[in-house]
Image (spheres, helix red, strand yellow):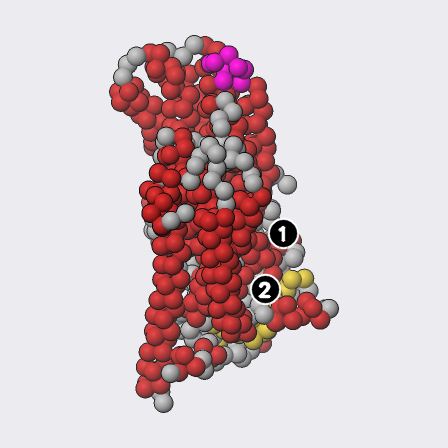
Amino acid sequence: MSSRLVNWFHFSSPATFYPLAGRLVPIFAVIAVILIAVGLYLSFFVAPTDYKQGEGYRIIFVHVPAAWMSMFIYLVMAFWAALGLIFNTRLSMMMAQALAPTGALFTFLALWTGAFWGKPMWGAWWVWDARLTSELILFFLYMGYIALQGAIDDTRRADRAGAILLLVGVVNIPIIYFSVKWWNTLHQGASVSLRGDVSMATTMLVTMLIMALGFWAYSIAVALKRVRCIILERERDAGWVGKLPEIRA
Amino acid sequence: MFEAMTVLIRRDLLLALRRRSDVLTTLFFFVIVVSLFPLGIGPELDTLRLIAPGVFWVAALLASMLALEKLFAGDFEDGTLEQMLLAPEPVFVLVLGKVLAHWLITGLPLVLLSPLLGLQYDLPGETLRVMVLSLLLGTPALSLIGAIGAALTLGLRGGGVLISLLVLPLYIPVLIFGAGAVEANASGLGAAGHLYMLGAILLLALVAAPLATAAALRISAE
Amino acid sequence: MLEVIDLECIRGDRRLFSGLGFTLGPGELLHLQGHNGSGKTTLMRMLCGLIAPAAGEVRWQGENIRHARETFHRDLLYAGHKSAIKGDLTGVENLRIACRLAGITVDERHAWDALERMGLRGHEDLPARVLSQGQKKRVTLARLLLSRAPLWVLDEPFTALDRAAVAFLEDVIRRHLADGGLVVLTTHQAVSLTDEAHVKTLKLGWKREGDV
Amino acid sequence: MNWSEFWHMGGYALYVWASFGVTALLMIAEPLLVGGRCRNVRRRIARLRRLQQEENP
C-alpha cells in the first residue's frame, strides 16, 4: 500500500476526521465571507448596466451560482455515496448526508431567484424553461433523499439506501435534463432561455465565478460543521467522544 | 439460469389469480382517474382530445406507482424475500422476474384497456394505436424504475408516500416521451422519435434497474 | 467446512459482538445460546450472508461467502423466524416453489410424501393461511426432507411444534449430521440430539468473545 | 450612484432585493441552525455521560 493511500484512509475514521473538520470550518467560513463580499461589490458597483434588462439582470449574480452549486453539490454527494458503497467507509456516507440540506437550499434559492428574475423579464413568475424545470426536478430528488434518510432509523441502512438513491438519481439527471429540453423545445419552439440573451461581458462572468466560489466555500464550511454533528450523534457511545474537551466541560 | 425466475413469475401470477382484488384495484384506479377529467374539465370533445395523452399517461403513472408498494411488501413480511436473496440465482435475475410478473398484473391490463377508455375522449384510431404502443413501451419501464423505490422503502412506515417522492422524479422522462409520442402523432409530427427514446429508456431500465433494486433489497432485508 | 474469523457486528450504532471465531466441520452441530437480544438471530443471518459483517469474515469451503455467493447458497438452507410461506398457496405448492427456488425440482408426489411424513396428512392441499402456527412450521420444515444442502441454519426450529414433531425433527437432524451435514441452530428447549462429541455451544451476550 | 438610486435599482428594487435578501437570509440562517444542532447534541451527550458516571462511578 503506497504511503499516500494509507494516510488517506487515516482520515477516514470519524475520530481523526472530527478535529480536522473543526479546524477547517473557520478557514472556509472566512474564505466564503471574503469571496461573497467581493462578489457583491462587483455585482452592484462594477458590473455595467445591461442595455436591455437594466438593473434587474443583476439577479443572475445570485441565480447562476446557486444553480451551479445545486447541481455540483448533488454530484459531490453522489461521489461520496459511491465511495462509501465501494470502501464501506461510514464517514463518506456522513459527508453525503451533511451536504444534502445545503444542496436543497441552493436548489430552492435557484428557483426563488429564477422566479423573481422571470417576473420582470418574461412577465411570469414561473417559466417552463428547460433549465428551471430541471432545477425543480432536482429539488424533488433532494427532497426524496432527505425524506428517505429521515424515514430509516438504522443509520447503516439509511446510509446505504440513500447512497443507492443518489447513484440512481445521478444517472437520471442527464436523461431528465435531455428529456425536459426536448419537451421544452418541442412545445414552445426555441423559447428564449433565461440567460441566452444577456451579453456575457467579462466582468459579469468573473463576478459570477467569484460568487460561485464563495458559495462553494460556504457549502464546505456548513457541510463540515454539520458532519461534526452527525459524527457526534453516531459515535456518542465511543470512548473518544467522552474525552472531548467540549463534552467533559 | 432462468429457472428460478420462471418459478417466481408463475408463483406471482398464481397469487394474483388467487387474490384477484389486487389486480382489479389498480385497473379500476386507472379507469376512475381517466374518467374523472372529463367531469372536471367539461364534455367538449376537442379539449378532451387535446388533453387525452397527458391524462392517460399521468393516470398510468399513478396507477403503476400505487401498485408498487405491494411488489416486495408481501414477500418481506412472510419471509419469502429472504429465501429469494438466498437462492442460488443472482438476485437481479429474480428481481427481473418479480418486476415482469408485477407488470403483467398491473401494467399490461392498463395498456389493453386504454383504447376502450380512449373512446371516452373521442380519440381517432391512429392516435389510439400510438397511445397503446407508447404505454406498451412505457409501463414496463415504470415498473422497473419503480421497483428501485419499492426496494429502498421496504418495511418503512409511510412507505407509500415515500415511494412516490423517490420515484416520481425518475418517472418524468418516461412521461415526457410517452405523452409526447401520442401528442406528436396527433399533431402530425410523427411519433417515431419519441417511441425510439421510450424504447431506449426501457432498455436502460431493463439493464440497470434490477441491479440497483437487488442492491437495495439486500440492504433493506438486513 | 464453515469457518468464522474474527467476526464483528454493529447494529444501530451498538456493537453486538466482536472477535467471534469458530469452525464447524461435517457432522457437527453448533448450538447458539444467549438471552433475547444477544444477537443470536443476527449472527445466524450473518452466517447466511444476509447481513454484512462490520469486520471479519465467514468462509464456506475456504471461500469467503460474499465472493462465492451463488455456490454457497446452493449448499445452504436457512429457516428463519418467518415461515417463508404464502398464505394463498397450498402446502404442496409452497413446498414445491420453495424447493425450486433453492434449485431442487420436486414433483407432486414427493411433495405430498414429504408433507405426510411431517404429519400433515389431509392438510396438504389446503391454503396455508388456514393452517395453525404449528402446521405452518411443519410445511416450512418439510423442506429439510427434500433438501440436499449440507449446511442447515435453523432459527428456533422447535417453537410451536408438539412433542411428536420435535422428536421427528430431532431424528431428521440426527440423520443429516450422520450423513456429514452441518447444522447451526438456536433453541430454548432442552435438546438431546447426538452424543456430546459433535455438539458445540456458543454463548452470546454473556461474554464479549464467544467460548467454543 | 448615490444611495437612493442604488436602492431603487432602476425600478427593479423589489425583484433584486427579494432575490439577494432571501439568499442572504438563508445563508445566514443555515449556519446558525447547524450550530444550534451541534450545541444540542453536545449538551445531550454530556448529560448522558454524567448520568452514566453517577450510576457506576
Residue topped by disc 1: C70
Q: Residue at x 52, y 47 (%)?
A: A208
Q: Is residue A137 visible?
A: no
Q: Quadrant of residue A158?
A: bottom left
Of residues C206 and A113, which is closer to you in this image? A113
- The residue wearing badge 2 is C182
Residue A84 in picture, x, y percent from top left = 56, 59
| Dot 1 alpha-carbon crowd within 10 angstroms: few under 14, some 14 to 19, many 20 or more | some
Q: Residue D57: x percent and y percent?
A: 36, 89
Identify the chain of the residue marked 1, using the numbered disc in the image. C
Query: Is residue B143 depicted above or below A41 in this figure?
Result: above
Residue at the spot x=59%, y=30% of the render? B200
User: Which numbered tag is attached to residue C151?
Assistant: none
The magenta segment: B184-191
Q: In the picture provided, is C187 more to the left or to the right than B210?
A: left
Residue plotted at (41% across, 33% down): A121
User: Which residue lies at the image location 61% right of the left edge and 67% below the top edge?
Assistant: C57
The first of marks 1 and 2 along the sequence is 1
Both marks 1 and 2 on one chain: yes
Residue type of the residue flagged with mark 1: Glu
Residue mark closest to the camera, 1 vs 2: 1
Between the C-alphas of marks 1 and 2, the distance is 19 Å
Question: In the image, what residue type sits under mark 2?
Answer: Leu
Furthest-front residue in this view = D2
Q: Which secondary structure is most common in the magenta stretch?
A: loop
- Residue A158: tell me if it is visible: yes
Q: Does B6 appear above or below C113?
A: above
Compared with B133, A19 (above or below) is below
Residue A54 on the magenta segment: no
